[in-house]
Image (cartoon, rainbow, N blue to C red):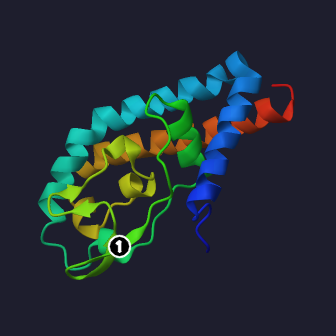
């Protein structure tokens, strides 16, 4: 699968599209905004638990997903970031060379440089096998499932409103 909006100009054009739609539709998009803010609250609420879970498993991991995986912001991530209070990043995520090979450019010695609510959703919903056996997993996964539902609902609302279809 190719990464969408890989070039900075393409990413900024996609962000500009959301801005133009927002200006044109205004308050009509409040249901999308409300869902984005609810998702943001879920991220904030679960952040400490996720950081604790990752702190127990990631430092000693031999197959670190931040080094192995290629991640990017998808359309739902862009909707969430634009309509939440955080705003859009300047570009799509990139990989960069590190001491042990190419890895996510946001991976630092202390973990991810991005706050949890600013990361692509895959960085939060993916649980490795070592994490799935820990007690905190069950509760965190319930929140992840709720966020997944809200992301689908947010995209559906955006498409419904911008297409002019009635509810």
What residue occupies the far front of the structure in this picture?
Answer: 9
Secondary structure under tag 1 reads strand
Residue 133: name its quadrant: bottom left
Q: Is residue 133 above or below residue 152?
A: below
Residue in the image at 36% along x and 48% along y: 141
Residue in the image at 55% along x and 29% along y: 35
What residue occupies the far top of the structure in this picture?
Answer: 27
**Residue identified by numbered label 1:** 96
Quarter holding the C terminus? top right
Quarter holding the N terminus? bottom right
Q: Is residue 107 left or right of residue 68?
A: left
- Tally the numbered discs: 1
- In this view of the protein, can residue 135 be seen by the observer? no
Residue in the image at 39% along x and 40% along y: 143
Can you give x and y, in whole percent of width and height, for residue 52 in the image? 16, 49
Q: Is residue 100 left or right of residue 96?
A: left
- In this view of the protein, can residue 59 be seen by the observer? yes
Can you give x and y, in whole percent of width and height, for residue 147 in the image? 47, 40
Residue 101: name its quadrant: bottom left
Residue in the image at 20% along x and 58% along y: 111
Q: Is residue 56 above or below residue 35?
A: below
Mark 1 burial class by Cα count in 10 Å: few <14, some 14-19, many 20+: few
Q: Is residue 152 left or right of residue 140?
A: right
Can you give x and y, in whole percent of width and height, for residue 38 in the image? 47, 27
């Amino acid at each position: 699968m190719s990464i969408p909006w890989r070039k900075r100009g393409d990413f900024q054009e996609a962000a500009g599209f959301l801005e133009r739609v927002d200006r044109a539709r205004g308050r009509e998009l409040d249901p999308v905004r409300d869902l984005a803010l609810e998702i943001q609250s879920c991220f904030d609420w679960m952040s400490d638990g996720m950081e604790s879970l990752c702190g127990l498993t990631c430092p000693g991991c031999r197959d670190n997903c931040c080094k192995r995986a290629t991640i990017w912001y998808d359309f739902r991530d862009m909707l969430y970031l634009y309509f939440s209070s955080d705003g859009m990043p300047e570009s799509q995520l990139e990989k960069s060379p590190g001491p042990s090979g190419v890895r996510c450019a946001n991976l630092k010695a202390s973990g991810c440089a991005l706050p949890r609510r600013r990361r692509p959703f895959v960085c939060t919903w993916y649980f490795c096998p070592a994490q799935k056996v820990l007690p905190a997993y069950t509760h965190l996964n319930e929140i992840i499932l709720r966020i997944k539902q809200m992301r689908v609902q947010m995209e559906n609302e955006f498409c419904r409103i911008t297409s002019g279809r009635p509810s």
